[in-house]
Image (cartoon, rainbow, N blue to C red):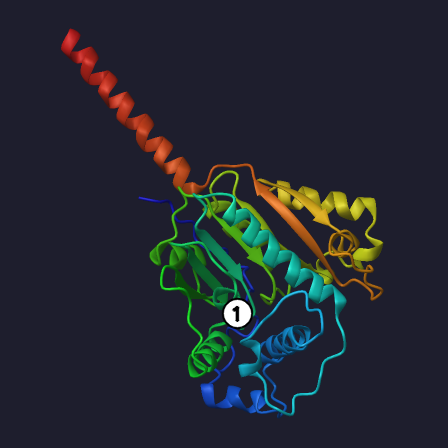
Amino acid sequence: MDIVHQWPLSISLNPRKQARPTTMASLSHLANGNHHPDPLLHSALRSASLRFHESHRSAPLFLDPYCGCFLSPDTAPPSASTPYRLATKFIDDELMNRMMSDDELRQVVLFTDGMDTRPFRLNWPRSSAIYDVSPGSVFQFASQRLKDVGAKISRTCMLLHVPSESSNIQERLCEKGFNGNRPSIWALQGLPLMTSASFNDLLFLVSCLAMKSSIFLGELPGWLLGTEFGNMQAATRKWMESLFMSHGFQVSIVSYAEVARKLHLEPPTENLCSALFVAEQLRFSDAQMERWRSEFDRLEDEGDEEGFEEL
């Protein structure tokens, strides 16, 4: 049986956890173009709007044919966000390239805002299990809209949701079939992380579940280090590397300029309030350690039995 750590009490993946539950009816107000106090839905809709307008550019970096179902016809176009465009393209390509090059890699965990359409719009390999960890209320609203427009995941793949407000996300993922003895890839974009403690808890979660050599990648919010990433100092970068290493990850920071160059684009001129990263798990997962201990105990028992027979 896999070891399941208790989720740290300091977790704050959903800062509205203690608030009055939001109903599907109330969520619909903002989607219809009206203002609504729900900050999680507002943020998710803004990102969906950015993807919608990117998809309608003459030379889009990616296509999202489903994000329009979340928006009302009178939704105002958002201000351009080159970093978000590059980050989305970077994460899309990393996920697909790594999965297509490894026949054993079929577990994907997406930390999202609840409106991530990657499970529907990307060409996942057969037998992929895609886990979406995101705010439950936003995911439910988005799921209904996607169902209304006929969006479907490939018949050979599975999409499973775990609410980010769950008291024990690790346990919920394992209950839904995640296996720490198999390779996995993890991506972060959109999940509301409001404190450095919540990000530390997220690293703890991935470290416990991800098999050795698994990859964790995505987009980090700028406030995490208290700096604009375009002006990241060496000491700040070293602190970030130490934070990842404390959970068993070797991390590399990927610059937006590098991503833009590979796409033959000019680097973004906006202040960079996020950073891209790719980290490799250097430790064994809890499941791997448990399997190793079970095998060790079995061999030890067999050795005792052989010694007894010799006597």
Q: Residue at x 46, y 82 (%)?
A: 149
Query: Which quarter of the picture shows residue 264?
Result: bottom right
In the rendering, at what x and y percent does residue 231 appear? 84, 55
* Along the viewing direction, whichever of 225 and 48 lies nearer the viewer: 48
The three-letter amino acid code for the residue at tag 1 is: Thr
Query: Which quarter of the picture shows residue 41?
Result: bottom right
In the rendered view, does 195 fall on the left or right side of 132? right
Asked whether the viewer can see residue 199, the reply is no
In the rendered view, does 160 fall on the left or right side of 53? left
Q: Assess disc 1: are there few (<14), some (14-19) or many (≥20) residues with their C-alpha within 10 Å of its C-alpha.
A: some
In the rendering, at what x and y percent does residue 171 appear? 39, 56
In the rendered view, does 140 fall on the left or right side of 68? left
Residue occupying the far front of the picture: 58
Asked whether the viewer can see residue 300, the reply is yes
Q: Which quadrant of the rendered structure holds the C terminus?
A: top left
Q: Residue at x 68, y 61 (%)?
A: 87
In the rendered view, does 178 fall on the left or right side of 218? left
Q: Residue at x 50, y 49 (%)?
A: 99
In the rendering, at what x and y percent does residue 152 appear? 42, 71
Query: Which quarter of the picture shows residue 225?
Result: bottom right
Q: Is residue 17 above or below residue 248?
A: below
Q: Which quadrant of the rendered structure holds the N terminus?
A: top left
Q: Is residue 204 above or below residue 274?
A: above
* Along the viewing direction, whichever of 161 and 53 lies nearer the viewer: 53
Q: Residue under circle 1?
A: 117
Residue occupying the far top of the picture: 311
**Which secondary structure lies at badge 1?**
loop
